[in-house]
Image: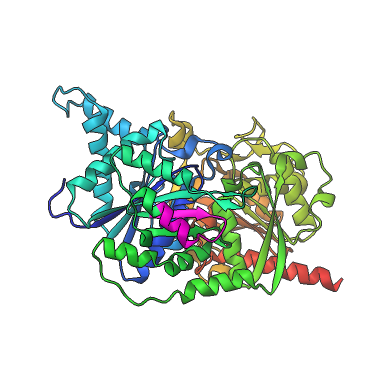
Amino acid sequence: MKENFNNKIIFVTGGVVSSLGKGIASASIAALLELHGLKVSFLKLDPYINIDPGTMSPQQHGEVFVTEDGAETDLDLGHYERFSDAVMSKKNNYTAGKIYHAVLEKERQGFYLGNTVQVIPHITNEIQDRIVDVAKESDVTLVEIGGTVGDIESLPFLEAIRQLSHKLPQKQTIFIHLTLIPWIPTASELKSKPTQHSVNKLREIGIQPDILLCRTQKTLPQELRAKISQFTNVPIETVIAAQDTDPIYNVPMQFQKEQLDLQILRALDLPQKTISLHRWQQIVDTCKNPNDTVKIAIVGKYTETKDAYKSLQEALIHGGIQHNLKIESHYISANELEEQDVATTLSSFHSILVPGGFGKRGTNGKMKAIQFARENKIPLLGICLGMHLAIIEYARNVLGWKEASSTEFQKTNYPIIDLMEEQKKQKDLGGTMRLGNYKAILAKDSLLASIYQTDQIQARHRHRYEFNNLYKNELIQAGLKITGVNPDLNLVEAIEIQNHPWFIAVQYHPEFTSKPYQPSPLFASFVKAAYEYKQTLAKK
């Protein structure tokens, strides 16, 4: 353990079932602690063996969130950034695969001096070193353990945090356990037994929770809190209700009403302040009392999974908050759209969004949506692959280059989208990615520059293929506007088209930096354009 380490750590675990919302709970706690004047950071520890989620299907794992420094991370890091002022990096997310990989590399280099390398102490020490490394930079660090207590793969992480809590002085660490209190309709009762079993499982491995967050559909009665307290050895005042709420931006206020922030500050011996949640109240009020509604079609290939476009969905909500509008997002399967009449499917929407993705599946459906938006003057936002397909669609249907395509999908005589020469030399698939923050210089007369109110931005990227500059001049002459360019690599970052009220496609991912109280300018403008289109329709 490093000397003079006196920073505070909150360990967050989950029980009973997965997907209870540990990420949103952690992010909401951070929002409250920041209001008390504390610098807060996070660490997400995921027990799966993958090095990172970059090669995992969004249909299985949800979206891959990208940090400024180019790390492909768990989607919970998106919650952390949306709720707090913390900026995530590659240090804020470690998987079991990363931990084991680091230990095995040390073993090959003779770091352990011939000792037998074991889960305890080598893996657990490595985990603790990563925790301390992140925690030393903030007043309080929330360490979220992925998965559910009782999972075999989580055990090394739980053992590591158990050991660390004993190595550090009292009031330097606390354990918060998020659990489920299910409502049984046939009995008209909330049941505490799953929570009792979950806490018992934690106590079997030596962890006694200090605070319980009880996820529930109904109000948690005082008598049930007393019962939970009795059977889990958790003080009744730290049995906290985490009742279902909509929108999720109500959670900080819900926790503050339960005095969760004060319980944490007392447990960690930290000073309290009188705080105001006015900003969060305004956000919730706007979400609950919008002036109007806009319908937005998201034409994607991962539409079966709610979390596949998590940051994108939240960025749309943020854009709606800025204009006091409710967003009705409808996910349209790009694969199914290939066989459907596009006008029948999309004509009722006020704007169309074509998000990123990898691979050929569904690309023809996405291009049908793009063509429909272009020809009918419907606001369109294309992101990443959405930009590639907007360019290909334009080349095919405006210039008549029917073979125009991407080498990601097929060999073609018109490789409008292609790998750069340096990328083609890479053997490691991950080495071909452009990840993290890159600059974009915006054309001064562009819609994009007027949206951002500047001619230079930084934005996060996650892609492999690029616009092929060999075709730039011909496309420009045909009315395609190149409105964003990376100055270091001379790569296209954004396009618009002439004679269209709002048609923008970008190579980067603006959704990753949007917050409810600081919406992405591009999403805010897109939502506004959707509302203006709705008003235009009403006048016809």
Residue 376 picture location, percent across and down: 80, 58
Q: Nearer the viewer, residue 467 or 310?
A: 310
Task: Write the residue at 55% across / 66% down.
Answer: 521
| Quadrant of the rendering where the N terminus is positioned | top left
Q: Nearer the viewer, residue 264 or 401?
A: 264
Relative to 273, say whether 330 is above or below. above
Residue 67 picture location, percent across and down: 42, 51
Q: How is the image coloured?
A: rainbow
* Residue situated furthest right in the rendering: 540
Region in magenta: 212-228
Counting labels gives: 0
Q: Is residue 498 visible?
A: yes
Q: Nearer the viewer, residue 250 or 450?
A: 250
Residue 386 picture location, percent across and down: 63, 48
Q: Is residue 89 visible?
A: no
Task: Write the residue at 22% across / 37% down.
Answer: 125
Picture quadrant of residue 273: bottom left
| Quadrant of the rendering where the C terminus is positioned | bottom right
Task: Write the residue at 73% across / 40% down.
Answer: 364
Residue 506 picture location, percent across and down: 58, 54
Relative to 479, say whether 258 is above or below. below
Q: Nearer the viewer, residue 60 or 410?
A: 60
Picture quadrant of residue 329: bottom right
Task: Write the residue at 77% across / 61% down.
Answer: 377
Magenta-colored stretch includes residue 215: yes
Relative to 461, say whether 287 is above or below. below
Magenta-colored stretch includes residue 76: no
